[in-house]
Amino acid sequence: MSSTNFSFDTIQSFDDHIELSIPNYVNLRESVLRVATHFIGENALVYDLGCSTGLLLAKVRLIAPESARLVGIDRSDNLLGKSGSQGVTLINDDLTRADFSLESCELVFCLFTLQFLPLAARKTLIEKVHSALKPGAALIIAEKQYVDNGYIQDLFTFSHYDMKLEHFTAEQILDKQLSLRRIMRPQSEEQNLALLKVFGCVTPIWQFLQFKAWLCIK
């Protein structure tokens, strides 16, 4: 699988690619699904922002009440076109659009999405999510993040590369990094938590190396 000129608009077999690129991604997804069951009741509305193929929502569909509405939003037709899951609505939209809005809802997923948005747009999106969530409802968010300690940052980075070398060549890993530098801007944990401070409760639910997920309850 070549990583040259990585783009969400052209990549094939995206779900397989992500599972090989993010360490323990399957474990993260299972953890997220288990936590999500506490927030998805009858007639609940669930969003996945940056849903890619809609695979997460397809798995939610298997555990959610039939009356629950599941809506995925992504701006890449290449990814959205892969999903044919019954009972999941997929919408092509730009999360950074000025008049983008969400209906009142019980749960929002945002997994490795903020890091691809302009820095100035992230706070606005989180505020829109917070406004849309009902009291007691939740945002489940995951991000790749930088570590303030340079030694630990290098340790995490090269441990991640060691894992990726099990599935990709060194050239493919470097090619992808060269492409991602143009579109991905991870932040530190302190910066990510600053964005989430509007929530009454923010607690980590998963971490592996520099990848981390939080449960945020309104």
Image (cartoon, helix red, strand yellow):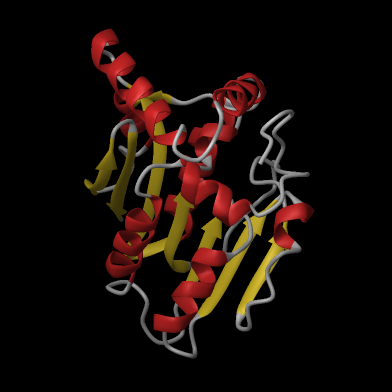
Q: Is residue 35 above or below residue 124?
A: below
Q: Where residue 74 sits: x, y (%)?
A: 66, 53
Going by the image, does 151 lie left or right of 21? Answer: left
Q: Is residue 51 above or below residue 107?
A: above
- Could one spot residue 11 in this view of the protein? yes
The residue under the point 69% across, 41% down is 98
Q: Where residue 125 sits: x, y (%)?
A: 53, 42
Going by the image, does 210 lie left or right of 164? Answer: left
Q: Quadrant of the C terminus?
A: bottom left
Going by the image, does 217 lie left or right of 127? Answer: left
Going by the image, does 84 lie left or right of 133? Answer: right
Q: Closer to the camera, 49 or 34?
A: 34
The residue under the point 39% across, 35% down is 163
Q: Where residue 185 sits: x, y (%)?
A: 53, 24
Q: Closer to the camera, 103 or 80?
A: 80
Q: Is residue 92 above or below residue 11?
A: below
Residue 147: quadrant of the picture: top left
- Could one spot residue 191 in this view of the protein? no
